[in-house]
Image (cartoon, rainbow, N blue to C red):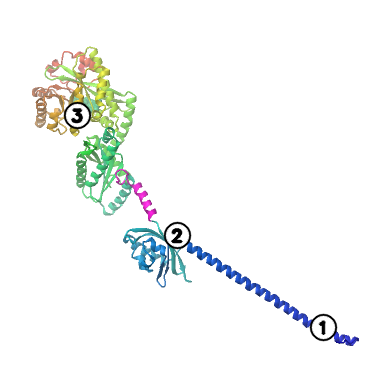
């Protein structure tokens, strides 16, 4: 192509070129824009595909992970489409209940019909309530029947899927077998509420049941009784036969108590040898008395353990809701106080609570700690009450009687503190002290040339039964130098008859030492004549309660007369204690009673007073009998 080279020609050419260039430029720009757009579109497509791929991959991984979790988890899964009422249970779910996949239909009823009858209504009601007001997780524990018929504890927890209105259309959840955990929890709870030895409810469970019983009694306006049972002298079984035997006996005691009460009543073990019985829905206290009597009678039957046969008894304190307290702890405390009273009035009995009883219980506690001090601080003394021969008036000796001079309370009667000492076991130490003291003082009087035959020492049943007691007596005689013939031991009739089976044995061992034995308080227990005849006993002591009334009550006179005759028939001497009046003395002399003691002759005297008494009446007491006075002879000693 040739170009025209003139100005105008140039401008025409220029104008045409410019247009071409401009078009070209627009095309290029457009092309570039398209390229850029295509590239960015390509990039966008590429990114989207990559993203999609990534998402797919993540989804797959999650699915895989979820599948692994499902497979490896011991928990079952379930999914309930509420709208279409379709349920899916995972194979593991079915396995938990002992089924293969095909054996357990994917239906709501498969679950519902396996619910434990005790849980069914409650759980279905809870499902219903949850669907009505869906909030948070659904979370419940219940029992489902396994294929083998047993029940499994299940924890089910689910998340809801909600429609746009917030209504649940689906529940998806896990199904966890928590049977082992529940059983472990139950075991822990059982252990916390039961006594390991007897398997009876313990104090905690009793408190719980008392609380319920009170609430029930309040509604029905009825009464609740609590019987506090404490075995008498159980410590002795533990000490002499060992703890394994003691444990076995406690188990047998528990069994007997349970057998004696109705199934609805609760028998609990509180501690050691303490039990309690909770009795509800009894209208009359007479019925409770009947139960208490049956319990006592059942415990009195002999126990056989490891070749030993022995007897137990118990003391029972009874308190009543609402009369004696409206809180479990108070009612129990008051029943305990009543039990103490039953113990101190002779054991093997029951006693109802009253306000005065609580004070007595506090006194018991105070006395026990006081007794420990008394031994350490020499607050004890032995007094001697002279005994005379009712035929000759000769002084035969004395009965050693323990005296406790309390620094604040003054004189405390042995009748009050001996039962406390027996209960706490302190009687062993106290009894040993009395024996040693009396033997040592009597031996000293002999060495001084004072004349008397015997000194009598009271011994508690707990002491005399102890395996070491015979040895203690022998050693005491040796160390003090008192001849065995000069010592007499007084044991109560009550104790001997309760321990009738074994009494003959230990009494025989003691007699072999050369000492004599007297049965104290004779007539107050229930002696079996056949036992009495074979006991190696030297004397019967007519209880002062009979002596007091020999002149006013013919029946008492007959009893005293019968005891004198019985003693003589069995070749025993008979002693009367508590002679206060001349006519009583006359009666006893007339009936042939051998020996006597009492305020009429002399009060219990201190050591020095007794020595003076022995010296003064060395020639006998006959002058007194002739004079017929009834002045207590403490005054005679002092003249
Ligand atoms: P017990 O062995 O029957 O002792 C006789 C009790 O009668 C003594 O009471 C005595 O003081 C009291 N007494 C004496 N003369 C008369 C009287 O004319 N009329 C009346 N009403 N009572 C009289 P005490 O000293 O208070 O002893 C009471 C019980 O305590 C004793 O009864 C005995 O069972 C026990 N006891 C006393 N000392 C000891 C002891 O060292 N060891 C043991 N285990 N028990 C003891
Ligand atoms: Mg006595
Ligand atoms: Mg007596």
Tell me: residue 313, above or below residue 145: above
Q: Earlier in the sequence, mark 2 or mark 1?
A: 1
Q: Residue at x 18, y 13 (%)?
A: 618
Rounded to the nearest angstrom, the CA distance separating label 2 from label 1 is 80 Å
Q: Is residue 327 visible?
A: no
Q: Residue furthest right?
A: 6
Q: Which residue is mark 2?
A: 73
Closer to the camera, 46 or 184?
46
Location of the C terminus by quadrant is: top left
* Residue 84 position in % (x across, y down): 41, 73
Assign a secondary structure to mark 2: loop
Location of the N terminus by quadrant is: bottom right
Let me know if residue 532 is in the magenta part: no
Which residue range is magenta in the image? 179-201
Q: Which residue is mark 3?
A: 505
Using residue 244 as the reference point, say whether residue 531 is left or right of it.
Answer: left
Rounded to the nearest angstrom, the CA distance separating label 1 from label 3 is 149 Å
Closer to the camera, 58 or 310?
58
């Amino acid at each position: 192509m040739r170009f025209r080279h003139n100005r105008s020609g140039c401008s025409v050419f220029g104008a045409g070129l410019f247009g071409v260039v401009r078009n070209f430029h627009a095309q290029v720009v457009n092309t570039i824009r398209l390229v850029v757009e295509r590239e960015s579109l390509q990039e966008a497509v590429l990114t989207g595909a990559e993203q999609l791929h990534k998402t797919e991959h993540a989804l797959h991984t999650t699915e895989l992970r979820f599948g692994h979790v499902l497979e490896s988890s011991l928990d079952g899964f379930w999914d309930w489409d509420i709208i279409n009422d379709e349920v899916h249970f995972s194979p593991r779910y079915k396995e938990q209940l002992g089924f293969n996949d095909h054996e357990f239909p994917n239906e709501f009823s498969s679950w519902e019909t396996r619910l434990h009858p005790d849980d069914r209504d409650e759980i279905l009601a809870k499902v219903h309530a949850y669907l009505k007001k869906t909030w948070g997780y659904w979370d419940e524990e219940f029992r489902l029947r396994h294929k083998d018929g047993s029940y499994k504890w299940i924890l089910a927890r689910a998340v809801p899927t909600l429609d746009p209105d917030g209504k649940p259309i689906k529940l998806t959840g896990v199904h966890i077998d928590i049977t082992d955990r529940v059983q472990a929890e139950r075991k822990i709870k059982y252990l916390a509420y039961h006594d390991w030895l007897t398997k009876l409810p313990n104090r905690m469970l009793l408190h719980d049941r008392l609380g319920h019983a009170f609430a029930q009694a309040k509604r029905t306006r009825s009464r609740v009784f609590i019987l506090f049972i404490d075995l008498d002298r159980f410590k002795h079984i533990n000490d002499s036969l060992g703890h394994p035997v003691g444990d076995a006996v406690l188990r047998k005691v528990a069994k007997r108590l349970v057998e004696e009460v109705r199934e609805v009543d609760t028998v609990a073990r509180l501690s050691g040898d303490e039990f309690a019985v909770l009795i509800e829905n009894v209208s009359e206290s007479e019925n409770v008395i009947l139960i208490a009597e049956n319990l006592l009678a059942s415990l009195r039957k002999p126990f056989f353990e490891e070749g030993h046969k022995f007897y137990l008894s118990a003391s029972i304190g009874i308190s009543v809701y609402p009369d004696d307290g409206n809180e479990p702890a108070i009612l129990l405390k008051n029943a305990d106080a009543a039990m103490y009273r039953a113990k101190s009035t002779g054991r093997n009995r029951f006693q109802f609570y009253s306000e005065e009883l609580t004070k007595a219980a506090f006194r018991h506690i105070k006395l026990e700690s006081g007794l420990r001090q008394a031994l350490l601080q020499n607050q004890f003394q032995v007094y001697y009450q002279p005994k005379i021969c009712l035929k000759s008036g000769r002084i035969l000796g004395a009965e050693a009687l323990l005296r406790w001079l309390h620094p604040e309370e003054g004189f405390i009667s042995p009748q009050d503190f001996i039962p406390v000492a027996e209960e706490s076991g302190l009687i062993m130490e106290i009894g040993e002290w009395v024996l040693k003291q009396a033997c040592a003082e009597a031996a000293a009087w002999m060495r001084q040339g004072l004349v008397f035959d015997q000194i009598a020492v009271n011994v508690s049943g707990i002491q005399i039964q102890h395996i070491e007691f015979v040895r203690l007596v022998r050693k005491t005689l040796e160390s003090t130098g008192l001849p065995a013939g000069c010592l007499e031991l007084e044991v109560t009739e009550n104790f001997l008859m309760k321990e009738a089976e074994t009494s003959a044995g230990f009494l025989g061992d003691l007699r072999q030492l050369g000492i004599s034995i007297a049965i104290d308080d004779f007539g107050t227990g229930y002696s079996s004549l056949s036992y009495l005849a074979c006991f190696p006993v030297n004397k019967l002591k007519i209880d002062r309660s009979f002596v007091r009334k020999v002149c006013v009550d013919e029946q008492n006179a007959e009893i005293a007369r019968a005891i004198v005759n019985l003693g003589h028939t069995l070749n025993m001497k008979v002693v009367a204690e508590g002679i206060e009046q001349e006519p009583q003395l006359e009666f006893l002399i007339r009936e042939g009673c051998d020996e006597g003691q009492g305020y009429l002759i002399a009060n219990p005297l201190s050591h020095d007073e007794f020595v003076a008494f022995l010296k003064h009446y060395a020639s006998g007491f006959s002058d007194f009998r002739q004079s017929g006075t009834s002045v207590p002879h403490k005054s005679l000693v002092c003249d």
